[in-house]
Image (tube, rainbow, N blue to C red):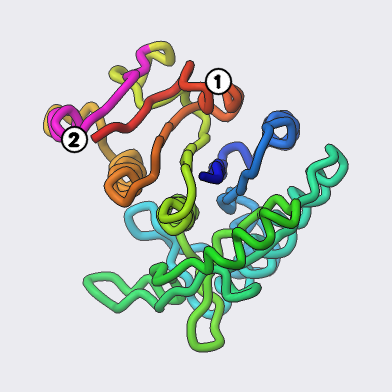
Amino acid sequence: MREIAVIKVGGNIIDNEAKLAAFLKDFAALPGNKILVHGGGKVATEIGDRLGIQSNYINGRRITDKETLDVVTMVYGGLVNKKIVAQLQKLGCNAIGLTGADGNVISAVKRPVGEVDYGYVGDVTGVNTSLVNTLSDAGFTLVIAPLTHSEGVMLNTNADTIAQETAKGLATTAKVQLVYCFEKKGVLMDAEDEEAVINTIDRKSYEELKASNIVSGGMIPKLDNAFEAIDAGVSKVIIGQAEELAELLKGNAGTQIIK
């Protein structure tokens, strides 16, 4: 059975040139088939400010109106994605940058309006795993921007979800590892103690961690995504620090999510 690693790198790494360069060096050095899904970071906000387009958030989530959609499409699918691809090429990693619209690699629907209208935000409906496998078998490393599409319109889409859905789709024909890389060493028992990494989390302990408020905020949707991936057949899901990428894949660092 083929093996592939789906690795998501968060916006806090994207925002730091030195950290991103170090991460990409480690990523390029990984053997075997791999896919990189990247977040957007603060670049879209900064460029929007320069253009006089204000960023609006509700509960930490960006509201994507038409003007903001133009900005995130330019920044995520263009500036950020192509800078990453160029750096990987320099490192000898034959990367190809994609949004969800390219080759219809990730399709979605516009999120229905509920209590909040998030605007042009996508909920993933499918991953073109045939294309992913074809490109991977041809020696390309996919670099996927946090953008999908529906009805001829680009949609701003959560990068964690794109990584999870890509891993789930590939898990039907491959052994897949899903790694969420961010600035922390893993899920922490104490947010103030960087060394207090929880080595493994199963569903029972997850509910206990939520009830005691040890796990809260943005970590909850990340862990929800992780458990959904495990339930769909992804062989391993790990959350940890970008600087420890190689050790995360070996199981020697970070937090592993198990059933």
119 up-or-down from 213: above or below? below
Residue 32, position as x, y percentages in the image:
66, 38
Residue 124, position as x, y percentages in the image:
41, 68
**Three-letter amino acid code at disc 1?**
Glu
Return the mark for residue 84: none
**Three-letter amino acid code at disc 2?**
Arg
Residue 192, position as x, y percentages in the image:
37, 17
| Circle 2 residue | 203
Q: Residue furthest front?
A: 1
The residue depicted at 47 percent of the width and 43 percent of the height is 176
The residue depicted at 59 percent of the width and 57 percent of the height is 45
Q: Is residue 243 magenta?
A: no
Q: Quadrant of residue 47?
A: bottom right
The residue depicted at 38 percent of the width and 13 percent of the height is 193
Disc 2 element = helix
Q: Is residue 13 visible?
A: yes
| Circle 1 residue | 247
The residue depicted at 51 percent of the width and 63 percent of the height is 55
Badge 1, how many Cα within 10 Å: few under 14, some, many 20+? Answer: some
Q: Nearer the viewer, residue 97 or 93?
A: 93
Q: Earlier in the sequence, mark 1 or mark 2?
A: 2
Residue 1, position as x, y percentages in the image:
51, 44
Task: Say left or right for 255 vs 74.
Answer: left
Q: Nearer the viewer, residue 169 or 148?
A: 169
Task: Say left or right for 66 vs 258.
Answer: right
Disc 1 element = helix
Q: Is residue 54 visible?
A: no
What span is in magenta?
196-209
